[in-house]
Amino acid sequence: MTEYNDIIDRSDISLLYPDEDTLRRYSMGSEGARLTDITTEQLELQYLMELRTCDFGSFYTADTEVILYRQDTFDDMANVPELSDILLKMIPFLNDITELRRLGSDSAASGDNYLYSIAEVELYTSLMEMLRDELLPLAPKLKSKAFKRFAERINTLTGSEYFTNINEQLKELTSRVREVKSVTIGVNLDSQLRAERAGVLSINNEPFKSGDLLNKMLRLDFKNDDMTCIAQLIPFRKGQSDNTQMALNNAFNGAITEIYRQSVRSWKKVIQHYVLDNTDFLIRMIPEIEFVTKASDLIAKLKEKGCPMCHPVIRPISEKAFDAKGLCNPIVAMKLDAPVVPNDFTFDENGMIYVLTGPNRGGKSVITCAVGHAFVMAQLGLPVCAESCVISPADEIFTHFPTGSEDTIDKGRLGEECSRLSSIFEEVTEDSLVLLDESLSSTGSFEGAYIASEVLHGFSMVHCRGIFSTHLHDLAASVDSINAECIPAGGVRIDNLVAAIEEGSRSFKIRREKPDGKSYARDIADKYGLSLDKILEKIKN
């Protein structure tokens, strides 16, 4: 037999991490980037995918190598759709193996249950045979390192002499165990015919037959033999309590386990090492499998909605690059039947932080979230909803959106907003992305604009990228004066964006220009007949 150590590849296989060191850093929680639950909630990422064994923060990364590795993984998922079906078929096998290990561990205190070991190897071999038969024929189509390595591992394992021998031993054992149909019980009696000792005399591969006269007549079989009951002890199960039934079953299972103990013990070491090593990496992949299959389904749905999709060009984090053409909000795309209005968006030396103003329901929140979605999807390794995109990852995305559950008892709404903004400054770095939507809207325009200008000055000095979506037009008007203070002090430049109004209607287009509050008000007034010209016309009539 080929030695186990000769055939096992101890490097870890992952669909999302390119090497063992990167996977270990992720497993230890030392990944430098993070995506918090509050950001996930405020960007409504759960609307895109409902994840059970993981969350979006589980796989968020700023590592360029990891992102590129994942892009190739998702390309294979898109180009070889059979992969999703194969991965989904793996889940029941892996869940059953996990449950068997739990049951085996629970039973260890009362003696090893070797039948669990047989069942686990049976599940393992069935899983490997499924992967051999369905995954390996797809190998010539696979381009990503992730799936190539996965296929190579399966080919190595299923093609080994060791796997063949395991299968042969398994078939021999399972045929003996699965074919047990009855046991012959021997009972010693005392002088008063009371049962004194009992034990299993033999294990049989055919069931006992009833010795009742009627059944004999129906079978036309009047002979007595070793497999025919001459008298039943009790009507089995009839009238028995649950505890009695459990005790009887445990007694039989215990006896059978004892009989097969020697047979299974000889290969128990194989189960503990070979099977454990070669199922552990698969069980560890359960969250990855859920993520890549659901993410691939999301990408397909967005394409069906007519949303442009592209893999972004990933630039070093230090460049702070972001340039998206035809950017769309994926959640809006999923919710609407109509096409989503695309926008171009860029962070550059003339605007690393933006003050975004415009009418209510004019697209300010939509584009603010769309930028956040682009970062998240890119850093998860997914295509982004844009015609083209160049991006430097963010170490963290900070959001400050209306929560609807402000702690107003002790602080008041404004105090709560200021407290949350202050907490961002405790953690934000120059590599972060900050998204503020209608922050400081709970106070008057003068107070709000004053505090907001201080906040903008602070983010400018941090050198982070950010969007401040606001109804505070005074804040937008003060951008030049804020720049005049922060740029000489070493801060980054702040610029204006406007949610455009065209002929009195919201266009949902975002323009890089200084806002004209009067123009917007004039268009709205004209639309509803409240411009001075229309008022005078009505008066005259």
Image (cartoon, helix red, strand yellow):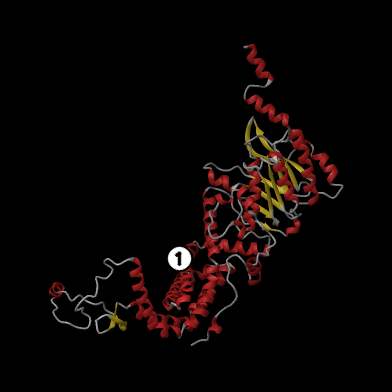
Q: Which residue occupies the extreme right position in the image?
A: 488
Q: Residue at x 67, y 50 (%)?
A: 324
Q: Relative to 282, is 513 above or below?
A: above
Q: Position of residue 220 (x, y in %)?
A: 13, 76
Instruction: Work out whether 531 lies above or below 484.
Output: above
Query: Which of the pair 57/1 is nearer the observer?
Result: 57
Side (left or right) of 389 relative to 295? right
Q: Residue furthest bottom?
A: 1
Tell me: residue 208, above or below residue 430: below
Q: Position of residue 207 (x, y in %)?
A: 26, 77
Determine the residue positioned at 61% across, 61% down: 71
| Residue 126 image position (x, y, % from top left) | 43, 73
Q: Is residue 199 above or below residue 90?
A: below
Question: In which image quadrant can residue 317 be found?
Answer: bottom right
Q: State the residue in front, 318 or 137.
A: 318
Instruction: Please count the marks in the image.
Output: 1
Q: Quadrant of the C terminus?
A: top right
* Element under disc 1: helix
Farthest top residue?
Answer: 540
Residue 160 seen by the camera: no
| Residue 319 position by quadrant | bottom right
Q: Which residue is mark 1?
A: 92
Residue shown at the point (47%, 82%) measured from the top left: 268
Examine the rendering and report whether any part of residue 218 can be seen. Answer: yes
Bin the neighbour count of mark 1 within 10 Å (Cα to Cα): few under 14, some 14-19, many 20 and up: few
The percent coordinates of residue 189 (x first, y second) are 27, 83
Left or right, residue 272 beside residue 210: right
Which three-letter amino acid code belongs to the residue tagged 1?
Answer: Pro
